[in-house]
Amino acid sequence: DAGVIQSPRHEVTEMGQEVTLRCKPISGHDYLFWYRQTMMRGLELLIYFNNNVPIDDSGMPEDRFSAKMPNASFSTLKIQPSEPRDSAVYFCASSLDIRNTIYFGEGSWLTVV
Amino acid sequence: AQSVTQPDIHITVSEGASLELRCNYSYGATPYLFWYVQSPGQGLQLLLKYFSGDTLVQGIKGFEAEFKRSQSSFNLRKPSVHWSDAAEYFCAVGAEGRRALTFGSGTRLQVQP
């Protein structure tokens, strides 16, 4: 299996622009997670889906952030408008079930200038 | 609520020396416990996990961890560290129900030649 695939790997954008991060989970995994990693706050869970349905979005920082999972093989995390404080590494991850091993993608490195 | 603490932000050891990284968790029942490793510029990779049974768990790359219920700990150990072990290590705890894994703040390991 190819593992969790994220795109883009790196993105630099200007403040106010819309950013869309994409994720393809491992086939057959029912859970998909979006995490954000920063030096200051460490690894934070933003939102996770079960069978394409958002289960817990309490970690989404504010309304500028939105996530969708239109089907079992694709998810997006959108930031609109982006701000410099959104600069971070965004990880997508997937697992077979909530108590099982989470497999991470290589991350999307976002810089907002 | 479940939580996990990694008291050591940064540890430096000499190559060939033994290693122990600390992890303490807070959860009312028996948790599911994980150790992940993150190399620079990479996603997180599972080292080992504990669900039940034998409290000493063997993982990849020569790592092991021991679950101690009385101390609420799940420390990671390696008898002889290699330079390639330099990375950041994350402990994570999971629980029953639909809550996702909670990650600790990480311990950065530096290996001196």
Image (cartoon, coloured by chain):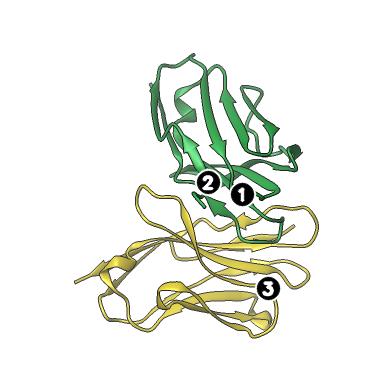
Chain colours: A green, B yellow
Does residue B94 lie above or below A26 as drawn? below
Whether labels 3 and 2 belong to a single chain: the reply is no
Residue bearing mark 3? B51
Q: Marks 3 and 2: which is nearer the front?
A: 2
Residue A102 location in percent, x, y? 60, 56
User: Callout 2: residue from which chain?
Assistant: A
Residue A65 location in percent, x, y? 62, 26
Outermost residue, top side: A16
Residue bearing mark 2? A4
Q: Which mark is residue A44?
A: none
Task: Tell me the CA gap for discs 3 and 1.
Answer: 18 Å
Whether labels 1 and 2 belong to a single chain: the reply is yes
A29 vs B23, nearest the viewer: A29
Residue A10 location in percent, x, y? 38, 32
Is B3 left, or right, of A15 in this rendering? right
Circle 2 Cα neighbour tier, 10 Å, few/some/many (<14 / 14–19 / ≥20): many
Does residue B84 lie above or below A30 as drawn? below
Image quarter of the C terminus of chain B: bottom left
Callouts 1 and 2 close, C-beta under 8 Å:
yes
User: Callout 3: residue from which chain?
Assistant: B
Q: Residue at x 53, y 46 (%)?
A: A4
- The first of marks 1 and 2 along the sequence is 2
Count all numbered tags in the image, as a single digit. 3
Q: Quadrant of residue A111?
A: top left
B18 vs B60, nearest the viewer: B60
Is disc 2 placed on a helix, strand or loop?
A: loop
Callouts 3 and 2 close, C-beta under 8 Å:
no
User: Callout 1: residue from which chain?
Assistant: A
Amino acid type of the residue that numbered disc 1 sits on in the rendered structure: Ser
Q: Residue at x 59, y 30 (%)?
A: A76
Residue bearing mark 1? A94
Q: Residue at x 41, y 16 (%)?
A: A14
